[in-house]
Image: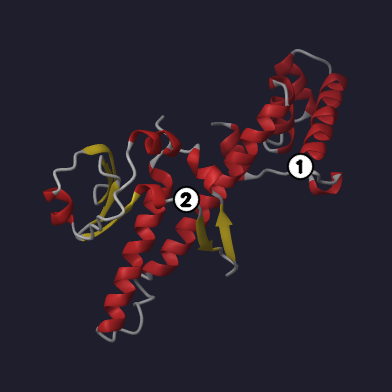
Amino acid sequence: MLTLRELKMIVPTAKTNEDIHRTNTLIKTGAKVVVSETIDNDVKISVYDNGYVLYEEGKHKTIFRLHECKSYEYYSKNGTIERVEEEIFENQKWDLLLLMIGMERVETNRSRLMSKHKVLSFDTGENDYLSIQNIAVSDMLEKLIIKETIGEIKNILSERQMYAITAYYCGGLSQERIAADLSISQQGVSILTKRALEKIRDYMQISSCDITRKKNKNFTDFCCI
């Protein structure tokens, strides 16, 4: 998997005296595509060897500089502004942050165009694109943050501790079932999960009341990755 950090190391920084806003201008520079990804047929993201990114969503396009893509701010479901730091995106697949930035820029351009033509609102009965976008971005980032947390927890737990804690707290399996899977006693499972919880509490600085046994679909999905 090519990460965003690796891509930035491959692609040179865009020239400060060069400002490209149109697809035709980008093509005329003779720049070559370094990497490209197509999503759902009508969305495409391409990175060029001159440091520019081209995001295409149907007939809508936007161009921006790769190395200016760092942290990301968005409105969460409860209306507050959330910020995801650069370090999180740097180690993820190269197109994640670029797709989110491209999506936001296209929506901003759409809003400006609608305002210019005095279109005051979307038809909420059919396609409230802005609401859909906010939910999609919020869910995407929530999933990313959960995945990042799981990755951190995996680094402090042994493989057996990780299985025991996720099977019991996320999957809802009984200690008897986990004991059979690990070929140990039920008491051994109890000790294993207790030590794992102690490590998690110390690392994340949380209290025991913050950890409850229930099925969490998002968390379980990541445990299975």
Task: Assess disc 1: are there few (<14), some (14-19) or many (≥20) residues with their C-alpha within 10 Å of its C-alpha.
Answer: few
Work out whether residue 55 or residue 69 is closer to the camera in this orientation and state it.
69
Asked if 105 appears above or below 15 in the picture, the reply is below
Please give the name of the residue rendered at 77% of the width and 37% of the height, measured from the top-left corner.
203
Q: Mark 2 points at which residue?
A: 70
Q: Quadrant of the N terminus?
A: top left
Residue 58 image-quadrant placement: bottom left
Residue underneath mark 1 = 204
Q: Residue shown at 73%/26% (left/top)?
A: 157
Residue closest to the eye, 76 or 167? 76
Closer to the camera: disc 1 or disc 2? 2
- In the image, is residue 32 above or below residue 182? below
Q: Which amino acid, mark 2?
A: Lys
User: Could you say whether the residue bearing mark 1 is in a helix, strand or loop?
Assistant: helix
Q: In this view, does 172 lie above or below 56?
A: above
- Number of numbered callouts drawn: 2
Amino acid on which the number 1 mark rests in the picture: Met
Q: Do the residues labelled 1 and 2 touch (CB within 8 Å)?
A: no
